[in-house]
Image (cartoon, helix red, strand yellow):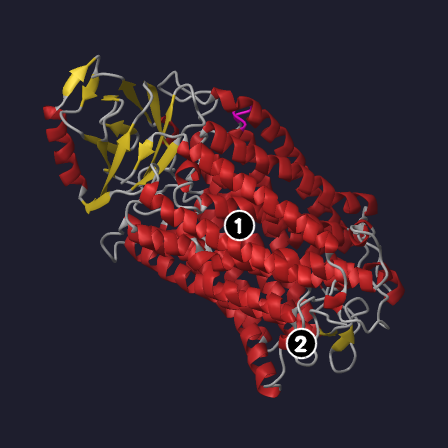
């Protein structure tokens, strides 16, 4: 297998090679499948990114690019390609990295993996085509991400989604078999943390995918008239098992990638296996309860149900995220102090390899996810505050804070890493590659904040083609929010350009990038030193991390109090 | 070296935890319980809770309710004046039945929300203070009775914030709140 020379690394006779960057024993089967899924993900990113442009240029109503009917189709394509296809193809690749690659095993059942890939690709294509050709009212509506029953979307859409979900489960089977065999062979040996994180991710994913399968099979049967009626509230509850669950896959996969990349390119170590693993176990138990966040302002679920679930059972999963928020930077701080890389309070951070886009993308992802996506997720998930966020543009701000500047940015760093270490190519356009995470994080960060302001301060709804400049049939409009949308429009263009720069750099590197010919070519990726030091890693100072976390907590508390203040200014509602 | 790519060595469960990490665990644990406690307690003493009775209702049943409500209601400048403290609003593609409606400050109304067709979003704000807005999901098949008491007079605008089809953006209704009705 040597398509365009992309699958032809030198392996020993047993099919393995030793990675000069990670030191892992990498088998040909694993590496080739990681490449396959990773490349497919980048194609989905490209497609979804094109629709990001048309969607943003419609929401910037001064430009007003699309008619409403086209807008909802483009918005659906933007959502499915970025929130689902780009993410999930990457996540299968991450399972193969976290499982067989980290454990130094070959990928079993390669035919199953390929069958999964083919099914996923066919499903993704069918979904795209069905959305693109949706004819509108009465029963060919654009589905957006949610396809809320009883509004009807084309049957082929549901069929495409079902195929994609089935394909994903199939593609995950080789991962599960790998772990099964590993445990059988080494029953008393703990998994490495990254493999453990991947395993937790896979279970969370399995829950979400099974929920999704139930949802979309039922919806499909309803659409082809095999079952009579779809209850709106039941559908919502079913749908969000995958609707939010899929985003929890992103979270768990991203956190795993954070541990992986901060270690490899930054020199981070695990400061406490116990604490980090406990946090992953908390995710396992509680994170999928977060699906309830979408039902806070719903009529059909009780108060007790809402409060228990929205809080992930007493904030078990938010607590877990705040544990990672300390453990990952602390790992970097302690690991780099141990290696003698930077003193003082923040020297460990400022001395980092900031021109390496793998490093900068990872760090920006950690910071922006926490401050923009994480805090807002918990705040808007409070049952009462949700009334002021529900279905507003602020919600869109929240999940661009998690998925765009969080997960997508981390995955961009990971793709660059895969280009360097697995495709064995130097990054093309080196200066642009170095700048790319800065441009994307900066521009997208502004976009996210503008979305939140537009939603919270001006009540601008999500999912609409027109509301700021004018609302047809009335003099009323949300014109006061127009300046925010001017900023949003400009920075969205910049963010999309930065996204395009990512694709250009990644693809050009594969096609024309210099080949990595020996360990020396990738030496800059490795954080070395510190091997001779026997001091346990938890004994190093974590002063800088602690200060950063205190700032984080202060921002969290202030956001929380401000949101509650805004809420209590409202007229009274509810029993 | 404690690498996340290697099997941890020795008795990793009993290794010490850095003092600052332990403090952080305490802080975040307390914060988690605090915000849970506040959210729960606010349902008891707070004035803004998305809580009300819910009933199953078919579209035809709700249409009948709307019909008898309209017949009992008065009229003022083309807007409905509810006959009592019950206010009925129905969402359908692409309008808000039951609006415009005139309400008064200081009276607690029971606002009934439902939909004749697909899911909609009831998003309401006063004309001149856009930051004061609240939003509720409106589902066909369910009648949600939300008590609401306005404290400031003025024109309130209702728009739909759940995608409901190509005419979604045109859904608009008004609620006029006056001091004395």
Sequence-wise, which precedes: disc 2 or disc 1? 1
Q: Residue A79, image x and y in percent?
A: 50, 45
Q: Nearer the viewer, mark 2 or mark 1?
A: 2
A329 vs A299, nearest the viewer: A329
Tag 2's secondary structure? helix
Magenta-colored span: A60-64
The residue drawn where x is 14% and y is 40% is: B61
Residue B62 placement, left or right of A381:
left
Dot 1 corresponds to which residue? A83
Q: Hey, which quadrant is residue A181 in on the image?
A: bottom right
Q: Is residue A515 magenta?
A: no
Residue A363 placement, left or right of A198:
right
Quarter in which the N terminus of chain A is drawn: bottom right
Instruction: Reply above or below: B21 against B89.
Output: below
Dot 2 corresponds to which residue? A103
The residue drawn where x is 74% and y is 50% is: A360
């Amino acid at each position: 297998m040597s398509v365009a020379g992309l699958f032809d690394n030198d392996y020993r006779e047993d099919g393995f090679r030793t990675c000069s960057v990670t030191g892992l024993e990498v088998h040909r089967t694993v590496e080739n499948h990681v490449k396959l899924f990773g490349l497919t993900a980048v194609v989905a990113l490209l497609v979804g990114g094109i629709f990001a442009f048309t969607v943003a240029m419609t929401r910037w109503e001064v430009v007003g690019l699309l008619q409403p009917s086209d807008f909802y189709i483009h918005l659906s394509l933007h959502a499915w390609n970025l929130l689902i296809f780009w993410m999930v193809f990457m996540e299968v690749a991450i399972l193969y990295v976290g499982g067989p690659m980290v454990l130094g095993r070959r990928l079993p059942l390669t035919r199953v993996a390929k069958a999964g890939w083919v099914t996923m690709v066919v499903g993704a294509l069918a979904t795209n085509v069905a959305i693109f050709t949706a004819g509108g009212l009465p029963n060919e509506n654009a589905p957006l991400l949610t396809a809320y029953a009883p509004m009807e979307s084309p049957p082929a859409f549901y069929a495409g989604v079902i195929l994609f979900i089935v394909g994903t489960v199939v593609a995950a089977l080789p991962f599960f078999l790998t772990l099964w065999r590993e445990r059988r062979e080494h029953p008393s040996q703990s998994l490495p943390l990254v493999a453990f994180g991947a395993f937790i991710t896979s279970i969370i994913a399995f829950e979400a995918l099974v929920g999704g399968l139930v949802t979309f099979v039922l919806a499909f049967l309803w659409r082809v008239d095999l079952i009579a009626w779809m209850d709106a509230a039941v559908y919502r509850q079913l749908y969000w098992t995958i609707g939010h669950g899929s985003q929890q896959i992103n979270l768990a996969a991203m956190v795993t990638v954070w541990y992986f990349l901060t270690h490899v390119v930054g020199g981070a170590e695990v400061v406490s296996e116990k604490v980090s693993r406990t946090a992953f176990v908390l995710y396992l138990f509680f994170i999928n309860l977060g699906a309830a966040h979408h039902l806070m302002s719903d009529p059909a679920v009780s108060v007790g149900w809402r409060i228990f679930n929205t809080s992930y059972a007493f904030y078990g999963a938010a607590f877990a995220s705040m544990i990672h928020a300390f453990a990952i930077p602390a790992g970097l701080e302690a690991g780099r102090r141990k290696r003698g890389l930077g003193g003082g309070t923040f020297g460990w951070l400022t001395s980092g390899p900031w021109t390496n886009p793998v490093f900068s993308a990872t760090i920006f992802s950690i910071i922006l996810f926490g401050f923009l996506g994480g805090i807002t997720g918990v705040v808007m998930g409070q049952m009462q505050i949700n009334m002021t966020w529900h279905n507003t543009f602020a919600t869109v701000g929240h999940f661009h804070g998690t998925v765009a500047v969080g997960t997508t940015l981390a995955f961009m760093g990971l793709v660059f890493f895969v280009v360097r270490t697995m495709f064995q190519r130097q990054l093309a356009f080196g200066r642009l590659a170095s700048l790319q995470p800065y441009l994307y994080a900066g521009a997208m960060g502004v976009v996210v904040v503008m979305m939140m302001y537009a939603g919270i301060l001006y009540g601008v709804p999500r999912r609409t083609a027109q509301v700021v400049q004018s609302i047809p049939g009335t003099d009323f409009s949300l014109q006061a929010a127009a300046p925010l949308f001017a900023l949003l429009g400009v920075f969205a263009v910049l963010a999309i350009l930065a996204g395009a720069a990512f694709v250009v750099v990644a693809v050009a590197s594969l096609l024309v990038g210099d080949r990595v010919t020996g360990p020396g070519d990738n030496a800059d990726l490795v954080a070395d030193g510190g091997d001779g030091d026997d001091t346990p890693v938890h004994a190093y100072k974590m002063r800088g991390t602690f200060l950063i976390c205190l700032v984080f907590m202060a921002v969290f508390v202030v956001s929380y109090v401000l949101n509650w203040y805004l809420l209590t200014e409202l007229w009274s509602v509810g029993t | 070296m404690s690498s996340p790519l290697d099997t941890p060595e020795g008795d990793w469960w009993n290794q010490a935890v850095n003092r600052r990490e332990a403090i952080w665990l305490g802080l975040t644990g307390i914060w988690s319980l605090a915000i849970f406690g506040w959210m729960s307690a606010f349902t008891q003493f707070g004035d803004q809770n998305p809580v009300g009775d819910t009933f199953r209702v078919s579209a035809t049943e709700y249409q009948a309710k709307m019909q008898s409500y309209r017949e009992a209601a008065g009229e003022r400048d083309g807007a409905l004046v509810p006959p009592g403290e019950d206010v009925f609003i129905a969402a359908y593609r692409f309008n808000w039945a039951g609006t415009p409606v005139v309400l008064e400050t200081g009276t607690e109304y029971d606002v009934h929300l439902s939909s004749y067709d697909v899911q909609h979003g009831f998003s309401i704000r006063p004309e001149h203070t856009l930051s004061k807005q609240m939003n509720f999901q409106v589902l066909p098949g369910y009648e949600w009775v939300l008590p609401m008491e306005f404290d400031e007079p003025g024109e309130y605008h209702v728009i739909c914030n759940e995608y409901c089809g190509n005419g979604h953006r045109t859904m608009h209704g008004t609620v006029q709140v006056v001091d004395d009705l």
